[in-house]
Amino acid sequence: MIVLTHTAIYPKRIFLNQCINSGSLPFKPHIKILNEKTIKTFEDTDKQIGLTISNNIKEMFNKLGI
């Protein structure tokens, strides 16, 4: 196998070439299943429940106790 210098320097090029040559991703993508706490947090955020709203970063840090 011959590896050209410009190919070795650019790993993104290798990745893109693999995608083009195979017509798919060179790995099997997977979806992480969310737990109940994460799902509830997303739902609450969508409903704007439990959010901390601030006018600036200093106020936000004070409200969060940071």
Image: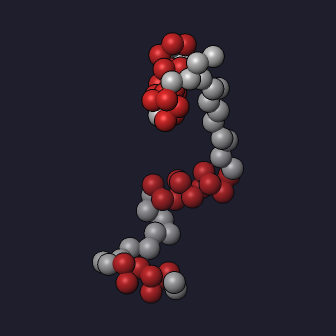
Identify the image quadrant of residue 60. Answer: bottom left
Spot occupied by residue 18 in the image (x, y as percentages of width and height):
53, 20
Q: Nearer the viewer, residue 42 or 30?
A: 30
Color theme of the render: secondary structure
How many marks the image carries: the answer is 0
Taking the image as shown, residue 37 lies to the left or right of residue 17, namely right
Q: Nearer the viewer, residue 12 or 51?
A: 12
Is any part of residue 12 visible from this angle? no
Q: Compared with residue 15, is residue 50 higher up or lower down, i.e. above or below?
A: below
Which residue is pictured at 65% across the width and 46% down the height? 34
Identify the image quadrant of residue 59. Answer: bottom left
Q: Compared with residue 24, is residue 64 higher up or lower down, i.e. above or below?
A: below
Taking the image as shown, residue 46 lies to the left or right of residue 28, namely left
User: Where does the N terminus fall, quadrant-wise?
Assistant: top right
Spot occupied by residue 65 in the image (x, y as percentages of width and height):
52, 85
Is any part of residue 65 visible from this angle? yes
Q: Nearer the viewer, residue 12 or 36?
A: 12
Which residue is pictured at 45% across the width and 55% down the height? 46
Taking the image as shown, residue 7 lies to the left or right of residue 27, namely left
Which residue is pictured at 66% across the width and 41% down the height? 32
Spot occupied by residue 57 in the image (x, y as percentages of width and height):
36, 78
Which residue is pictured at 62% across the width and 30% down the height? 29
Q: Compared with residue 64, is residue 30 higher up or lower down, i.e. above or below?
A: above
| Residue at the left extreme, as displayed | 55
